[in-house]
Image (cartoon, rainbow, N blue to C red):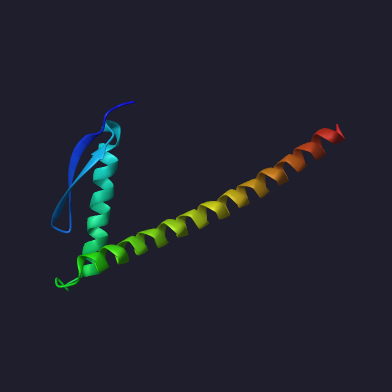
Amino acid sequence: MSATEPVSVHILDREYTVGVEPGERNSLMSAAKLLDSKMREVRGSNRMAAVDRVAVLAALNLAHELQQLRNESSAREKELSRTLADLHRKLDSVLGAT
């Protein structure tokens, strides 16, 4: 088991230190950058917006995007399964005819 290393990230002009596995540092930095971007988008020009409200709305937006991607992935998997089942039936039909 490898030890975590502290990594500082900046989100909405605040610094946070997070422990992360050495191989996951880049992924964490990308996630922090995405979250910072979403929070800035939600806050917009209203610099007086409460940070907790901005954070919750940004998290809700990200969760919604994640759910949409999961739904799209599930639909693609179902379509792929149908296509493979059709191909198996066709192969069985061709092989059974010989």
The C terminus lies in which quarter of the figure?
top right
Give residue 85's position: percent from left, percent from top. 71, 44
Camera-nearest residue between 11 and 76: 11
Give residue 50's position: percent from left, percent from top. 20, 69
Number of dots carrying numbers: 0
Q: Image point 85% across, 34% down: which residue?
A: 96
Give residue 80's position: percent from left, percent from top. 61, 47
Camera-nearest residue between 51 and 81: 51
Give residue 35's position: percent from left, percent from top. 26, 55
The N terminus lies in which quarter of the figure?
top left
Q: Image point 42% across, 56% down: which residue?
A: 66
Q: Image point 29% across, 41% down: which residue?
A: 27
Q: Residue pushed farthest right?
A: 97
* Above/below status of 10 relative to 59: above
Q: Is residue 93 left or right of residue 54?
A: right
Q: Image point 64% across, 46% down: which residue?
A: 81
- Residue 60, picture quadrant: bottom left
Q: Is residue 2 left or right of residue 11?
A: right
Camera-nearest residue between 83 and 30: 30
Q: Is residue 80 left or right of residue 3?
A: right
